[in-house]
Amino acid sequence: MTLKHPAISSKAPFMLHGADYSPEQWLKYPEVLDEDIRMMKLAGCNVMSVGIFSWVSLEPEEGVFNFEWLDELLDRFTASGIYAFLATPSGARPAWMSQKYPEVLRVERNRVRNLHGFRHNHCYTSPVYREKTKIINTKLAERYADHPAVIGWHISNEFGGECHCDLCQAEFRVWLKKKYDNNLDTVNHAWWATFWSHTFTSWEQIESPAPHGETQVHGLNLDWRRFVSDQTINFCQHEIDTVRSYNPEMPVTTNMHNIDGIDYREMSKILDVISWDAYPSWHFTDDGDDTNLAAWTGFHHDMFRSFKNKPFLLMESTPSLTNWQSVSKMKRPGMHKLSSLQAVAHGSDSVQYFQWRKSRGSSEKFHGAVVDHCGHEHTRVFGDVAEVGKVLAELNEVVGTSTPAEVAILFDWDNRWAVKDAQGIRNSGLKYEETVIQHYRGLWELGIPVDVIGSSDELAPYKLVIAPMLYLISEENGRNIEQYVENGGTFLATYWSGVVNETDLCHLGGFPGPLRRTLGIWAEETEGLHSRDVNGLVLEAGNELNLTGDYEAHEIAELIHLEGAETLGTYQSDFYAGRPALTVNRLGEGKAYHLATRVKENAFYTELYRAITSDIGVQPVLDCELPVGITAQVRTDGEQEYVFVQNFSGTAQAIELDGRSYLNMETGKPAAPKLELPINGLAILKRSAH
Ligand SMILES: [Zn+2]
């Protein structure tokens, strides 16, 4: 396994620090460019993402191009030692195009075509849009693919959304014909279409889901989501194809976001480097405790890193506040550095912002930026950014290092889509993502590195695989998990697993379907509980994990029968009091745990995973007790280990280190055995891997 990867660009083999930059908004203010370059250097910035929404500035009229401003910008960057991710501008198109070619405008679920406006609103199928994108991208690639300042392609911006136009409907039917071997009968069975007489007798009868049409055929909904994801990825591939050949060495990325409509794991396959935009709403809680949000953010960093199992880029984050969250809070002292370095701790080789300079007008004029409307560097936010610039400059040896993990959490888009569409058992909130995060948080609190993988990924590299609410699973993936456990792996599943197959048909013969033999249980019934209903998980005296105490169980409860598994804990109340709620099954060389109910307290998951990882010899990053809200993450090249200790608890904390010798990378001095962490505090420590 390679532990040290090459830098994302050989031109810039250091930690990248920068922002989205839109000088085209300031062409009437020529002094701004000079000032910006001066302040970029002052803030320790070495990269900018440019051209993201610049289409009309590059092609003001159809076929009329203007690259002067971009030429000047990139040449100035070269002279100043600043690099650029060059964007293709397809995230927002000029009005002349919408006016002349209405087919580029997206049609909503209600089958009404949008007017021109906003952004991210084009049809991914439209041949005109594809052609126009190809023309502008080709022009950009011809001119800049070998420019010394350009270190990568930033394809479009935050792909997302769906179009229901006639072109997309026709393409959906082509996609279905390919998937189902041109056999309508196969489609009808896969979708259980006999239900409510929904059987299709002609391909032309199949339409995308619509609020005034079909929404009740779950298999159709799922296939539509897969089609939309595939079509978006196909469009992204179309854009990559137009720029790639001009310089095959130039890495390609697209900035992903929290958009559940695209299977990012699939999208990552066509990219050279993964990048994403992280906007956690810090300081949301009354008591200043950001632990849960920090775990949520850490999970996402880990997920984006796991797609390629190598460093990723934090492409956007806010230097202070956003303007689109319900309340826009500023980052409190320390939080900018802490949250920026959190990304690096989980595998990012960059800290980048939206945006360098606040727009003067329009919808993002109050979105946080490095440079505010005051126009100078004497601000708190600029100081915070410059401080991160200084720290990153000390971390160049971390570039390219890895985050080896022995534990994986399964998180699949197919499952995510299907479980939310299920209709039952708890329509007031199944909380799939929240459940995944709650399990992840247990490991994050222990400082145990985690990869986030899909059900078709290889399981063998991991000692422990956790699959919360794996509602959708194919027979094949079920067999893979079974083999993984037989060969010595440890697996944990929960309630509401193994329920449907890959086309959303229930597994027959008893749940959890293809996981039944692995888990050694039969789940006869599963119920949703009202928010006021509280049951409990009572741990059996002397259970093999040495777990003790009672915990609250809520929201979902499954009644299981043992088919080889042993009971570790039971339900506390209701007519099923005393029946198994936590079990373990031995299969071949491995073990499979099953949690039949949702436990409320976060502490349960910490204790559960402390016991399981200790049983199978998974090491935490630091061999010492971490208070709640503190995590330790590690990156390594195999020789040195870089340990990032982060305090999100909202209170000052101190921890006794584990006796190994550490260097504090910010001071260059040996770290004291007792590590003091102020509110929003962070320590970056280096130790030998041996
Ligand atoms: Zn369309």
Image (tube, grey):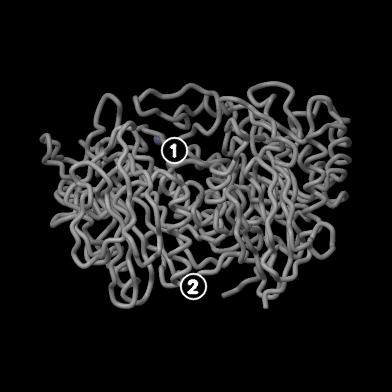
Of labels 1 and 2, the one closer to you: 2
User: Quarter of the image holding residue 4?
Assistant: bottom right
Q: Position of residue 559 (x, y in %)?
A: 21, 50
Query: Which of 8/495 is in front?
Result: 495
Q: Is 630 displayed left or right of 379 in the figure? A: left
Q: Position of residue 166 (x, y in %)?
A: 34, 33
Q: Is residue 512 left or right of residue 101?
A: left
Label 1 vs 2, first from the N-terminus: 1
User: Is the C-beta of the residue carrying label 2 under 8 Å from the nearest atom of ligand 1?
Assistant: no
Image quarter where the N terminus lies is bottom right
Does mark 1's beta carbon lie closer than 8 Å to ligand 1?
yes
Identify the residue position indicated by label 1 in the image: 126
Q: Position of residue 294 (x, y in %)?
A: 58, 45
Say the numbered circle drawn on residue 484.
Answer: none
**What residue is disc 2 on?**
617
Image point (88%, 35%), residue name: 35
| Residue 50 visible in the current orientation | no
- Measured Cα–Cα span from mark 1 to mark 2: 54 Å
Quarter of the image where the C terminus is located: bottom right
294 left or right of 333?
Answer: left
The image quarter in which residue 529 lies: top left
Q: Toward the viewer: 332 or 342?
A: 332
Left or right side of 482 for 293: right
User: Residue 54's quadrant in the figure?
Assistant: top right
User: In the current view of this chain or complex, which residue is farthest to the front?
Assistant: 541
Near-viewer residue (669 or 463): 669
